Image (cartoon, helix red, strand yellow):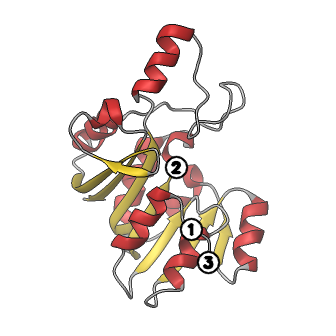
Amino acid sequence: MTALRPDLAIIAAKVPPGSRVLDIGCGDGALMAALRDRSGIDARGLEIDAANVAAAVARGLSVVQGDADADLGDYPDAAFDYAILSQTLQTARRPHIVLDHLVRIGTRAFVSFPNFAHWQVRASLLWGGRMPVTRLLPERWYDTPNIHHVTIDDFRAMVAERGITVEDAWFLSGDKRTRSAAANLFAEHAVFLLRR
């Protein structure tokens, strides 16, 4: 089994055995396969890219092609114990609506995203005057799927405005966890556990 991305490893470690999971924007199904292969977790996926759907299905996973912006309304309330949205929020056309669906479909929801307020991003803009290209944000501004540049503080404000509770949060700098103090400045990536 290949190692999971650090944000996915955090999520995989926190989902209890026997849970029902919907992974929205599941990519090639790496997280779903890890969840399935341990403790009988029933993992389902929704993915927009046909090649990723094919790769996930080839792993024996239950994945359908769909769009988080258009198709989440079709899922019933509390259909899953956990709804997961990893590195997808910033690509959604209406992230606030996707987030509302997430906490409606899952009893709890994990959301992970790159932090666009990280000090290296800020420095790139300040000193270079250009949108940064980093390890976590490897595409140029005109080639990126990211259409919303979310920061940790922006996300916290959005969930508070929507009456969503943050149960826990983890912050990553590089591939290692970092402290929550000043996370908006020092964390490259964030993982939040939410509930309505």
- Residue 147 vertical position relative to residue 87 in the rendered view, above or below: above
Quadrant of the snapshot with the C terminus:
bottom left
Q: Residue at x 39, y 63 (%)?
A: 10
> Residue 89, image x and y in percent?
49, 46
Q: Nearer the viewer, residue 41 or 163?
A: 41
> Residue 100, image x and y in percent?
37, 52
Q: Residue at x 28, y 44 (%)?
A: 159
The quadrant holding residue 153 is top left
Amino acid type at mark 2: Gln
Give the Cα separation between the discs numbered 1 and 2.
17 Å
Q: Check disc 3: other Cα within 10 Å, few if <14, some if 14-19, many if 20+.
A: few
SS state under label 1:
loop
SS state under label 2:
loop
> Residue 182, image x and y in percent?
24, 33
Mark number, residue 135: none
Q: Which residue is mark 2?
A: 87
Q: Residue at x 33, y 80 (%)?
A: 16
Which callout, 1 or 2, points at the residue further toward the start of the chain?
1
- Whether the residues at callouts 3 and 1 have beta carbons within 8 Å, the answer is yes
Q: Does residue 166 appear to the left or right of 46 in the view shown?
A: left
The answer to whether any part of residue 83 appears in the image is no
Which callout, 3 or 2, points at the residue further toward the start of the chain?
3
Q: Which residue is mark 3?
A: 1
Amino acid type at mark 1: Ala
Mark toward the viewer: 3 or 2:
3
Amino acid type at mark 3: Met
Q: Does residue 163 appear to the left or right of 102 in the view shown?
A: left
Q: Which residue is mark 1?
A: 3
